[in-house]
Amino acid sequence: MSLITAERRATADVGFPLLLRTWRQKRRMSQLDLALTSGVSQRHVSFLESGRANPSRGMILQLSETLEVPLRDRNDWLTAAGFAPLFRTRPLDDPQMSQVMSAVRMMLTNHEPFPAIALDRAWNVRMSNAPFDMMIAMLGPDLWDRVGARQPNLMRLFFHPAGIRPVVKNWAKVAPLLWRRALKEAEAVGGQDVAALVAEFSAYQDPHTLAAVADTGLFPVLPVEMEIGGMTVSLFTVIATFGTAQDVTADELRIESLFPADEATEALFRNAAASRP
């Protein structure tokens, strides 16, 4: 049985009432909060969560929209309530994804000479530009093999013992923020693939990192400083998503654009771009 099939079967076994209650609690909303925000009576929300009332297809979409449930999980809600899934999951090379992929390629190319990547919800690198590939090559041509990535994966890059942790000069500062981001995204997007990654890399987190997660302050920008080939490379990330996506794959894509945090790093990437054929 495939992981996707097992996940859908598990969702059907859970049932709609538990899914609704779980996502409402994830969003830290009371039944009254959800009722007021979605325009549904609190009594009806209560009946839906207790199983005393069955949801219509429209009600499922209305509540899932209010709770900002990812499209993949909205399909799970529909399936659990006995309806057919609504949102398709197209591969990236599907002709109907051509406009989305053209936009992604344009964003990655226009960000050069600085690194940029397109990730899915499980932090898999689905597309990258030339500066990102150059930076990975500087870290070692066998880097992805060392971290056990069948597909390049940013979570493995950061948290696997053979990943980039040894070259990150400010690991004590950035590790709690990175791990908190991983936990928050795992909670926000759900899914067994994301949960499995978090569970795998929890074992690699040292007590200091885990203790610091809850107390980590919020910084406008916290660069990751890496020592590569005797040079300090300092970068910070800006994330963009497709806010009106109606396809699961597009909904889960995000663009991570890395910007230089100092003049030396900017000069490094500009000079590297100038020297490429």
Image: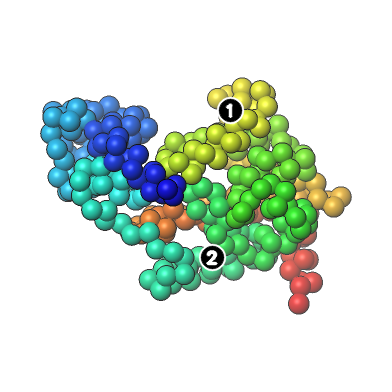
Q: Is residue 24 left or right of residue 152?
A: left
Instruction: Give the quadrant of residue 214.
Output: top right
Disc 2 residue crowd, few under 14, some 14–19, many 20+, Cα 10 Å: some
Which image quadrant for residue 62?
top left
Q: Residue at x 66, y 43 (%)?
A: 158
Residue 122: x and y in percent read 51, 47
Name the foreground residue: 204 vs 12. 12
Mark closer to the observer (1, 2): 1
Residue drawn at (81%, 50%) of the image: 228
- Mark number displayed over residue 107: 2
Task: Provide residue 141's location: percent of width, then percent of height.
Answer: 76, 58
Q: Amino acid at mark 2?
A: Met
Q: Quadrant of the C terminus?
A: bottom right
> What residue appears at the point 72 percent right and 39 percent down from the top-left corner?
161
Quadrant of the rendered image containing residue 33: top left
x, y percent for residue 251? 40, 55
Separation of marks 1 and 2 at Cα, in angstroms: 32 Å
Is residue 30 visible to the viewer in this orientation of the structure? yes
Query: Which residue matches tag 1?
Result: 213
Q: Callout 1, which amino acid?
A: Val
Identify the residue at the far bottom of this view.
277
| Residue situated in front as seen by the camera: 246 or 107 | 246
Q: Residues within 10 Å of mark 1 (few under 14, many from 20)?
A: some
Asked if disc 1 and disc 2 are in contact, CB closer than 8 Å, the reply is no
- 208 over 60 or under it: above or below: above
